[in-house]
């Protein structure tokens, strides 16, 4: 059934990538309609903001919970329970949950404000994929490409003609029921995973596991993980200034473009992102993880700054697409980097902590963007570009002062796409 998706990957990797695609399609659809649903229910801007902030906070908290419990409960079992919880969350929202219930669901980390999430399921997937490829980003490139493409289709489905035309009732909550079959199917995929995806260190490195503090599950790699988490938080803080919602607002205010034009732009951005993350592993094999991350991310931030000065929408859109071509190449390479610089027994916690660090700072972004926009409409774009460029330079400096990390390209790992299945 999933043979067409395998590309020479193992059965487990194929199942995990399929799970990511399913979830991204569902989140691509619900993330688009969530804001409209909140408005249709008559929630005040403060109430809507509380829900959206709770969604981001819930993603971070749930990732940390996954880090603490997943190795004990089992990665496959935790992954399956997440999908069942996702189905339950979709069902509860679909039947018209009141505000306080919606807030509780948001805090579980089973819903997302983004097309492709970085929550507990992503944490578990990244760790389980590391059993096949922890250092070259090949598997992670395909993993992110499928997520971006599926999320783009989900977002496009939310813009289907007539979907939001329901008279005075607005967007119906029952559309969230789409998460029910997605969650159930994801749980089935989790059930079909083999024991090989469980943390390899559980049997191979028992002595090391015993030395890791139970409270954090981080041992010798704790300083490295903390440093990476700090760097990634800086990058996410810059990204929080230029969320999809802000960009839509900026383009609308600056150029007066229609919602349809914006919809096609963000759909195109997602497609370009899918292609970009597929190409990233090839660059990483040639130039190394760090060189690929910094070498693509730094010029993308210069393009982001240039968007603020674009004289018209076509040029601004072209700059955005060019920026996306480069900016997303650090996603699979970043995930592979985290799996590379820690011991196998610390991968679950390392993935959770670094993912969560990106989310805990994001709620600050829209507030800062609104404040600096009082100076100039495009000021958040400039500030975001400068912050993210600073992250790139700091990451390069960090990598070249870390003895255990090689920044040279991997010339020994074979691309599974070229090997026989």
Image: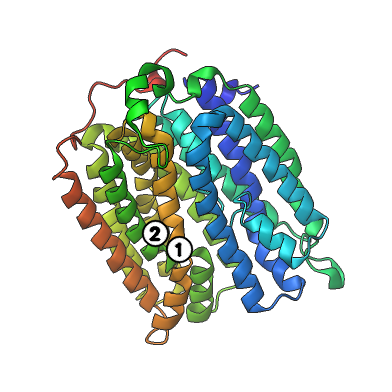
The N terminus lies in which quarter of the figure? top right
Q: Position of residue 259 (x, y in %)?
A: 62, 69
Report the residue that reaches farthest toward the top.
420
On the image, which quarter does residue 278 sit in? top left
Q: Position of residue 225 (x, y in %)?
A: 31, 44
* Mark identifier at residue 362: 1
- The tag earlier along the polypeptide, 1 or 2, is 2
| Residue 351 visible in rendering | yes
User: Could you say which is closer to the camera, residue 217 or residue 170?
Assistant: 217
Are there few (<14), some (14-19), or many (20+) residues within 10 Å of tag 2? many
Q: Say left or right for 291 vs 17.
A: left
Q: Say left or right for 352 vs 227.
A: right
At x 32% / y 69%, what residue is drawn? 305
Element type at marker 2?
A: helix
| Residue 145 visible in rendering | no
Above or below for 77 versus 251: above
Element type at marker 1?
A: loop
Q: Say left or right for 116 vs 101.
A: left
* Color scheme of the displayed model: rainbow
User: Could you say which is closer to the camera, residue 383 or residue 59?
Assistant: 59
At x 62% / y 50%, what residue is drawn? 27
User: Looking at the image, do the residues carrying marks 1 and 2 touch, with CB atoms under 8 Å apart?
Assistant: yes
Are there few (<14), some (14-19), or many (20+) residues within 10 Å of tag 1? many
* Mark identifier at residue 89: none
Q: Position of residue 272 (x, y in %)?
A: 46, 49
Above or below for 361 versus 200: below
* Mark identifier at residue 236: 2
Q: Position of residue 331 (x, y in %)?
A: 39, 45
At x 63% / y 66%, what residue is drawn? 51
At x 65% / y 36%, what residue is drawn? 81
User: Could you say which is closer to the camera, residue 136 or residue 90?
Assistant: 90
């Amino acid at each position: 059934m999933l043979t067409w998706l395998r590309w020479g990957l193992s059965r487990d990797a194929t199942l995990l990538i399929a799970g990511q695609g399913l979830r991204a399609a569902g989140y691509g659809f619900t993330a688009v309609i969530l804001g409209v649903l909140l408005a249709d229910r008559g929630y005040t801007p403060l109430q809507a903001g509380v829900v959206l902030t709770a969604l981001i906070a819930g993603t971070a908290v749930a990732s940390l919970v996954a880090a603490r419990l997943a190795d004990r409960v089992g990665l496959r079992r935790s992954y399956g329970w997440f999908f069942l919880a996702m189905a339950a969350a979709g069902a509860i929202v679909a039947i018209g949950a009141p505000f306080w219930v919606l807030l509780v669901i948001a805090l579980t980390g089973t819903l997302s404000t983004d097309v492709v999430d970085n929550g507990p399921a992503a944490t578990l997937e990244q760790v389980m994929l590391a059993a096949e490829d922890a250092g070259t980003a090949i598997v992670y490139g395909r993993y992110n490409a499928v997520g971006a493409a599926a999320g783009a289709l989900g977002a496009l489905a939310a813009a289907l003609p007539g979907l939001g035309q329901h008279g005075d009732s607005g967007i119906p909550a029952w559309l969230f029921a789409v998460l029910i079959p997605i969650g159930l199917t994801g749980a089935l995929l989790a059930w079909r995973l083999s024991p090989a995806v469980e943390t390899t260190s559980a049997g191979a490195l028992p002595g090391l596991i015993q030395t890791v503090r139970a409270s954090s599950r981080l041992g010798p790699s704790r300083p490295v993980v903390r440093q990476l988490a700090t760097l990634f938080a800086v990058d996410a803080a810059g990204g929080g200034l230029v969320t999809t919602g802000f960009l839509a607002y900026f383009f609308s205010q600056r150029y007066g473009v229609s919602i349809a034009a914006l919809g096609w732009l963000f759909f195109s951005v997602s497609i370009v992102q899918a292609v970009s993350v597929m190409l990233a592993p090839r660059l990483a094999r040639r130039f190394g993880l760090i060189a690929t991350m910094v070498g693509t991310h730094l010029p993308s931030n210069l393009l982001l700054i240039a968007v603020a000065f674009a004289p018209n929408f076509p040029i601004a859109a072209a700059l955005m697409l060019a920026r996306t071509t480069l900016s997303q190449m650090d996603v699979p390479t970043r995930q592979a980097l985290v799996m590379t610089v820690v011991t196998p027994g610390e991968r679950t916690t390392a993935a959770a902590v670094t993912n969560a660090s990106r989310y805990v700072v994001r709620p600050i972004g829209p507030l800062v963007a609104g404040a600096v926009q009082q100076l100039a409409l495009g000021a958040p774009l400039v500030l975001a570009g400068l912050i993210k460029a600073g992250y790139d330079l700091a990451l390069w400096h960090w990598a070249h002062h870390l003895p255990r990390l090689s920044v040279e390209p991997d010339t020994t790992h074979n691309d599974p796409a070229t090997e026989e299945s």
